[in-house]
Amino acid sequence: MGTHEERSVARQRFDVADAVPFLLDAQGVVTSWTRGAQQLLGYHASEVVGRDVRGLLAPRDAARVPELIERCREDGGWMGLLTARRGDGQPVKVMVRITPAVESGGFARWLVLLSDMAGAPGWDMSRTVLEQVVTSSPVGMAIVDGDLRCVWSNAALRQFGGGPAEGRLGQRLAEIQPGLDFTGIEAQMLHVLRTGEPVIGYEHVGRIRSAPHRETAHMMSFSRLEDDHGHPMGVYYTVIDITDRYRARQRVALLDRAGEQIGRTLDVVRTAQELADVAVPAFADLVCVDLLESVLRGAEPASGPLDDTEPVALRRAGQRSVDGGSAAAVVEIGGMAAYLPGSPPIRCLVTGKSYREERLDPLAREWVADVPGRGETTFLDSGLHSVVIVPLRARGVTLGVTAFFRRGRQEPFDEDDLSLAEDLVSRAAVCVDNARRYTRERDAALVLQRSLLPRRLPEQGAVEAAACYRPADELTGLGGDWYDLVPLSGARVALVVGEVPGHGIDAAAAMGRLRTAVRTLAALDLPPEEVLGHLDDLVARAAHEEGLEPDVPGVERFRSVGSGCVYVVYDPVDGQCSMAAAGHPAPAVILPDGTVSFVDLPVGPPLGTGGPPFEAVELALAEGSTIALHTDGLLAHGEDWAVDADRGRLRRALERDAPSLELRCCAVVDALVPARPHDDVALLMARTRLLGADQVADWDLPPDPAVVSQARREATRQLTDWGLEELVLTTELVVSELVTNALRHASGPIRLRLIRDSALICEVSDGGATAPHLRHPRTTDEGGRGLLLVSQFSQRWGTRFFADGKVIWAEQSLAEPPE
């Protein structure tokens, strides 16, 4: 009996009025003996005074005296039950209380009070009564010897398997219950035998012979049994059925695991597969998750009730089997599950209510029809014997169904299992619906993004170009940065990179407006600084019209205000490049030898904020040079104080070569931008080309009407040299009309230029500052048909201005006409 238990019993039974005292010295020797002690134990004072108190106790308790004396010293006393030995040799049960006897200079004796426990309730309980206790107890009890063979067990142990008590005698667990995982249990017994330390609350999970299809859990406790000399005799153990508690704990653990593992991504198919993965094998042997086709597309399920009398095709989005494959599944992942009319899956889909079949008819036909290579299979063929089907419902909408099957030695699904399946599916349904909604929103955002950014850069001969775009908002893929490449007249090309403050759909919409405006202004063939000037006016005017004046504290700014843009025009005829910037980093230039430099470009104010006029710079680029236009998201900080460090990082990234310009562009972004950038990033790289001398021909023409025929002859000769005889007639007409128009309506020198690129370009420049207008003359008019004819015979035509005049140009396609 432990110390605390002894004290508890002593407090309940000890009565000082009935106690008999005697005294001990510090070593446990009797120094005083009273009449009451003589009457209780039958010893005269002469027989005990001067003797060790251990001589008055039964051997087992006599051995405890040193321990008790030590306790008295540590705790200032002790109280508990002991067995004394009377003078006639008979044992007597006594309650003992030891307290210090205080004397001057400290105590040197112990006062012992004895109380007779003979007749105390339960102390002299008979063997018959004790046997009734253990035999009628609902707790399984057994005793094994040192060889772990059963020597006794109570009737309650039979409920845990292994037969009646008499059949257990002399056998070990492996013989009593074949198939039981006895290794762990016997290891606990051996530990208790070896150390004497009891084992409390050991859990054993397995299957017993009486319920082979049901997993059971038991809590066991083990204690060592010893003889009178303290030698181990065997192990006493108890068994309690905790299957219900264990299964409840397993359900909670499964739900916790489902909360952690389902919905980790916003992908419908991935989420469906996560549901199947969580449920197998902890809950089911086969799980099939089937969704409506519209759900996988991110669309809303069709409105209106479904008809359970017609076949319904569902897409198999997730599936898992205990065998690691899908041997028991009729439909593979990604395939269509065409369920038979009126089958349980269809009823669940239509009614939104769950279905449970404890025992499937083994000869019943499976519910999926029209599977190639599979005839009319039965549940016996697949080994499935129990099923739970739960509809995936979220926010009042049914998205599909989930079927849980068991086979083999698994026990059938019960009502608790149905509740657990519904909990699992309800959690997954919300995640599937979130993923569906995200798919819908993301698809819409991607459509918007694709409409705002070029799907591919247009074909042209001025540059070889590649671009890389990475938004900060990884969920929508939308951002405010953009890039563009716009073919211009005269084989030139405009390169544009810009950014709008902020991220997401609002920034993308503002970016789309700016990009459209830039393309419109580019079509006017304006110089870069004028393009940005017009763009600046447009942004400021739009902000004013919406009542959002720039630089007004406390007022939300118009989204495009503060945008940045860099506009570059490159001419492959002479390699000249002009550019201007509005609140945007200057481009970098990679020379053919790999040297990287940054253009010394005056950066004007951001768009819509007001400030000085924009300035442009011009520079000549050698063929094979690469212009790198980028937004400030490519730099680590994008702040003035970090420009040198950021440019150093960018320079090192641009110096690295790659097999292609596209790979080089992506490598630069990967090297400088994290997977989840803090800002949108756009990079446009263009490697320059030069047209050869044999691709350009030009002539200075005197202001003489007779020069028209000369211009036609020169053009015809050049087209013949280029092998473009089929364009001679139309080109002669275009040259005649443009030169004649210059002679009539302009002044100064006239210059004719032909360019053979992806198109045949005819240009006539003069000193006039007036743009020609296309007219639609009446039948009786004698003139005014020149530009009308040019427009009819050209793919496109237009006018651009320069410092000393203008150029009228027309293009004819060199591509083969479609058959």
Image: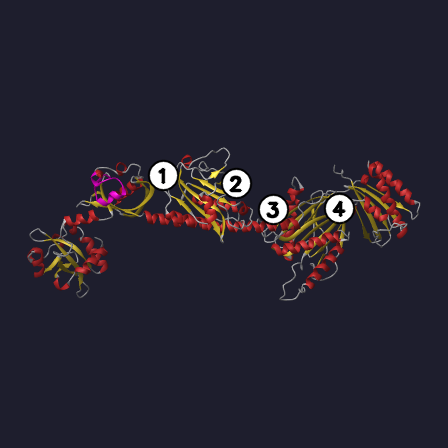
Describe the element under mark 4 as helix, strand or loop.
Answer: loop
Give me the disc on residue 670. 3
Mark 1 to mark 2 CA distance (whole Å): 30 Å
Give me the disc on residue 409. 1
**Which badge, 3 or 2, comes first in the chain's sequence?**
2
In this figure, which residue is indicated by the disc labeled 4? 621
Q: Amino acid at mark 2?
A: Gly
Q: Amino acid at mark 3?
A: Asp
Looking at the image, residue 750 sits to the left or right of residue 506; the answer is right
Mark 4 to mark 2 CA distance (whole Å): 54 Å
Identify which residue is drawn at 15% across, 60% down. Answer: 112
Q: Is residue 161 magenta?
A: yes
Identify which residue is drawn at 26% across, 36% down. Answer: 175
Q: From which residue to which does the magenta span run?
A: 148-166
Q: Identify whether 527 is placed above or below 759.
A: below
Q: Amino acid at mark 1?
A: Arg
Q: Amino acid at mark 4?
A: Leu
Could you say which is closer to the camera, residue 489 or residue 368? 368
